[in-house]
Image: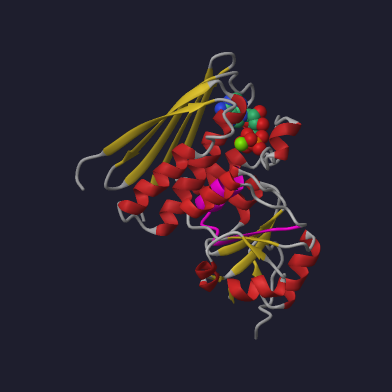
Amino acid sequence: MNKAFSQSFKIHGSDMYNAGKASTEIKTILKQLGINSTTIRRVAIAAYEAEMNVVMYAKQAIMIFEITPEQIHITVDDEGPGIPDVHLAMQEGFSTATPEMREMGFGAGMGLPNIKKNSDSMKVESIVGKGTKLEIKININ
Amino acid sequence: MMKLLEVAEALSCEVFSDEQQLQYKVEFGCASDLMSDVLAFSQAGALLLTGLVTNQTIQTAYIAEIKAIVFVRGKKPDKKVIDLAKEKKIPLLGTQYSMYEACGILYQKGLVPTMSNVPHKAMNE
Ligand SMILES: Nc1ncnc2c1ncn2[C@@H]1O[C@H](COP(=O)(O)OP(=O)(O)O)[C@@H](O)[C@H]1O
Ligand SMILES: [Mg+2]
């Protein structure tokens, strides 16, 4: 595999029923490509937390998944309220999740910190009232 | 390490998946209703005990490489949840025991934890 492979997914805000589908598909693709399981788990967890954040907080997003021989890139570009204080949002336990989201098992304020933990580089850019762009890079192996 | 068959026996489980999946082995146990915690603190190959019976439970398990799920307190998955688990090849069990009791029983049987913050002695030795 010399050329980069890429695929994009549409994520819809508030669509709890389909929440997680994009990340699940990414995981399946990585398994088919024979990527090692530790890397797959890191990518899947990071992508899933990012996907859940779109479902919980934003209107919609495009998730782009790219794989090169060295790295896996996940970019999630959403249209939504944005994050007023990214530094605060990155703190473990910080969450603005509603009671309904908590009932679904999310909203512990662990998502962004866990994305950081599972990635080799993570960048968050956000404009309040417009949206959030998250870029994740994970080295292969 | 515990065979699912032993887990099912220890917790008098109802089995919602193929009986042959009871041959699977689980290496660790973890328990939570918080899927974010499962994503942050579980390990591949673990058994998840949870009271949360939704699609997200299955998706989360698939993402985190959870080997099997036990629903506690008599909670039953609906057909959609069972079908999704089938597709993801994740066996589903259900027990009448509470989360506390179910964890205690499996812990006593020697199933080691994943979400531990304190140094832990393996009990099998
Ligand atoms: N895509 C997003 N759009 C708007 N706000 C977001 C987004 N992602 C995260 N946030 C904000 O950052 C907070 C922390 O996110 P996270 O660490 O994933 O924890 P949780 O989702 O459990 O609250 C969220 O509660 C929310 O306020
Ligand atoms: Mg989150």
**In screen coordinates, is A47 left or right of A53?**
left
Q: Magenta stretch: residue B61 in it?
A: yes
Tell me if residue A110 comes above or below residue A95 in the rendering. Answer: below
Image spot of residue A25 (x, y percent): 41, 42
Tell me if residue B103 comes above or below residue B63 in the rendering. Answer: below
Ligand 1 placement by image quarter: top right
Residue B101 placement: quadrant: bottom right
Q: Magenta stretch: residue B70 in it?
A: yes
> Is residue B80 among what the camera can see?
yes
Range drawn in magenta: B56-72
Q: Residue at x 42, y 52 (%)?
A: A40
Q: In the picture, which quadrant includes the N terminus of chain B?
A: bottom right
> Is residue A86 among what the camera can see?
no
Q: Residue furthest top?
A: A129
Image spot of residue B90 (x, y percent): 52, 58
> What colour scheme governs how the chains and residues are painted in the rendered image of this protein?
secondary structure
Q: Residue at x 62, y 52 (%)?
A: B38
Q: Residue furthest left?
A: A2
Image spot of residue B82 (x, y percent): 57, 51
